[in-house]
Image (spheres, rainbow, N blue to C red):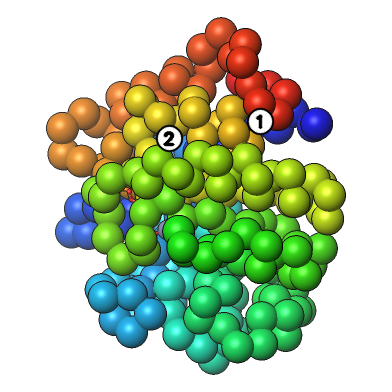
Amino acid sequence: MVARAVKLAPSILTADFGRLQEEILAADHAGADLLHLDVMDGRFVPNITFGPLVVETARQATQLPLDVHLMIEEPEQFLEAFANAGANTITIHLEACRHLHRAVQQIVDLDCQAGVALNPATPIESIREIAPFVDQVLVMSVNPGFGGQQFIQTMTSKLRRTRQILDEFNPTCDLEVDGGIGVDNIRDVQRNGANVIVVGSAIFNGTGTVRENLTALRDACNVAPYSGAQNNISAA
Ligand code: DX5
Ligand code: ZN
């Protein structure tokens, strides 16, 4: 099994939108690897956030790769708008898309990296056919729609099983996890195969600074090698 370096992807969902550029720059300067942008339409998920304009604002604020997570129905209608706004990776939900292969191909044709996301209740077997065509699979560890929710414990084993499928069908594919991650469980998701880790409220929370929070998460990933890993991943 390939050892993969962990990429930390702060989600701006709980950031202070009145100071959005400042918040983004703080994450950038504190060593974020990507910036995760949560787009919600009030249909696929019971919440509405923002569209391409905010992605464009983020694009102007930072050179970090923009990891755009589309929690919207019929995402194929908006792929070009998000690519033009500066997205580097566009992740669409398997549950929101009738012709997933075609939509993934559209993302690739727009010169973006393509990701497919799975809700907590969606079986991982659904990714077998699409895995060879994507750059990233996103395992949701909360039900999408809100920041600050509790990590669903069974998603740890889902990560491990997803990594096994990816190792078979697309070994270079990134495995991203999103929802309820903090200093107490980041090492756990890492050792179960996640190498792109989204963190919202444990970074943007108005208590510690963005730098302090991000450093604590990075330190939690870099503890001594885990001795009981189920899949030999040693990404520390
Ligand atoms: C949830 C979003 C997440 C969210 C994560 O629907 O996709 O990216 O911002 O926030 P935390 O880390 O607070 O669970
Ligand atoms: Zn997200």
Please state which of residues 145 and 213 is positioned toward the viewer in this rendering. Answer: 145
The reply, left or right, for residue 43 in relation to residue 99 is left
Mark 2 or mark 1: which is in front?
1
Query: Where's the C terminus, which quadrant?
Result: top right
Query: Does residue 130 sit above or below 160 in this rendering?
Result: below
Q: Which mark is residue 229?
A: none
The picture places residue 52, in percent across and down from the top left corner, at: 43, 77
Please state which of residues 154 and 79 is positioned toward the viewer in this rendering. Answer: 154
Q: CA distance from mark 2 to mark 1?
A: 19 Å
Tell me what residue is drawn at x 16 percent, y 39 percent. 206
The picture places residue 82, in percent across and down from the top left corner, at: 53, 77
Instruction: Count all numbered tags in the image, as a single digit.
Output: 2
The reply, left or right, for residue 90 in relation to residue 24 is right
Tell me what residue is drawn at x 75 percent, y 64 percent. 128
**Residue at label 1?**
5
| Residue 15 is at least partly visible in this image | no
Please state which of residues 59 and 115 is positioned toward the viewer in this rendering. Answer: 115
Q: Quadrant of residue 227?
A: top right
Amino acid type of disc 1? Ala
